[in-house]
Image (cartoon, grey):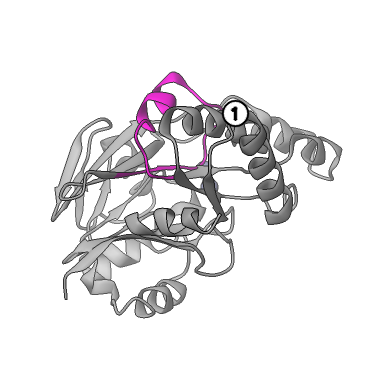
């Protein structure tokens, strides 16, 4: 059956990331960083099987983004869609598998959807954020995790997005005061590390002022240095005070399928405010 444009948070965080995107007859993943069993059950809840996927768009080669990606392509013929450098990094210790090269900045047309990637600052071979455009409706989704800081490229990329999936990895004070070893704190806080609540909210305020009503999912939250309540409370309060813009917030959970978005969903939820 032909499906509306929808986005499903299957898993998000340093223990594994996977986002399902659907429209018409098409379904694909952004990252496959959890075990196959979790992917199977996440897809089954949507009436899908692994073999139904048109591809896995891989943002970068870190384990929490590719755990099942190679098995998916090798065993189920689901192509990995990534830049040459990311594919090369994946295949360093693995055999070649079905894949499609998507140079950063190029477009992958799949059914009713256009996927476009853009560079993000992170300590991987060729890390990217992902934009998905639904051609029939003109609706756009921007997906950014694992980014050390907000760049001009990111600011440009998210323009016009009705759903913004954005990393809010850590609370800076909690991370600094916490038990992580110094080198790990430095890596996370670094220019090519992870986005803090504060940095994410800065971009969210800009986006709210430019975009008007839309939906935000806070993503890739640290288990040790953040909580959904902390990230959500801070983001909601700051965006409300700074922009007075009705934004629908949710958190993409680390341990289970959580948020689901369709273009009508934000309008519906906003009417309830
Ligand atoms: Zn990650
Ligand atoms: Zn990473």
In which quadrant is the N terminus drawn? bottom left
Q: Quadrant of residue 194?
A: top right
Q: Position of residue 61 (x, y in %)?
A: 42, 46
Give the image location of residue 105, x and y in percent. 25, 30
**Which structural element holds mark 1?**
helix
Q: Visible in this render: residue 240?
A: yes
**Residue farthest along the top direction in this orientation:** 152
User: Residue under circle 1?
Assistant: 202
| Above or below, comparing residue 217 to residue 8 in the picture | above
User: In the image, is 55 to the left or to the right of 200?
Assistant: left
Quadrant in the picture for the C terminus: bottom right
Magenta residues, as a range?
A: 140-164
Image point (61%, 43%), residue name: 168
Residue 81 coordinates in the image, percent (x, y): 25, 49
Tell me: 179 left or right of 121. right
Would you say residue 155 sits in the magenta stretch? yes
| Structural crowding at the residue carrying mark 1, measured as other residues with C-alpha within 10 Å and reported as few (<14), some (14–19) or many (≥20) | some
């Amino acid at each position: 059956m032909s499906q509306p444009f929808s986005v499903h948070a299957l898993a998000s965080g340093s223990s594994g990331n996977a986002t399902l995107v659907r429209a018409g007859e098409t379904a694909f993943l952004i990252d496959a960083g959890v075990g196959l069993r979790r992917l199977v059950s996440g897809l089954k809840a949507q009436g899908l099987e692994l073999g139904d996927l048109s591809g896995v768009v891989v943002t970068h080669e870190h384990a929490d983004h590719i755990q099942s990606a190679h098995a998916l392509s090798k065993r189920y013929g689901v192509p990995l869609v990534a830049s040459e450098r990311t594919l090369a990094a994946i295949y360093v210790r693995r055999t070649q598998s079905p894949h499609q090269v998507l140079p950063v900045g190029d477009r992958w047309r799949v059914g009713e959807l256009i996927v476009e990637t853009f560079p993000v600052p992170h300590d991987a071979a060729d890390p990217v954020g992902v934009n998905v455009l639904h051609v029939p409706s003109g609706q756009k989704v921007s997906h950014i995790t694992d980014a050390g800081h907000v760049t001009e490229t990111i600011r440009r990329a998210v323009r016009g997005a009705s759903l913004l999936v954005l990393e809010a990895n850590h609370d800076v004070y909690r991370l600094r005061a916490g038990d992580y070893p110094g080198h790990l704190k430095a890596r996370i806080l670094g220019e090519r590390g992870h986005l803090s609540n504060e940095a994410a909210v800065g971009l969210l305020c800009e986006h709210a002022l430019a975009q008007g009503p839309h939906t935000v999912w806070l993503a890739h939250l640290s288990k040790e240095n953040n909580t959904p309540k902390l990230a959500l409370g801070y983001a909601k309060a700051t965006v409300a005070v700074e922009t007075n813009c009705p934004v629908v917030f949710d958190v993409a959970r680390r341990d289970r399928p959580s948020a689901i978005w369709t273009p009508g969903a934000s309008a519906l939820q906003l009417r309830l405010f």
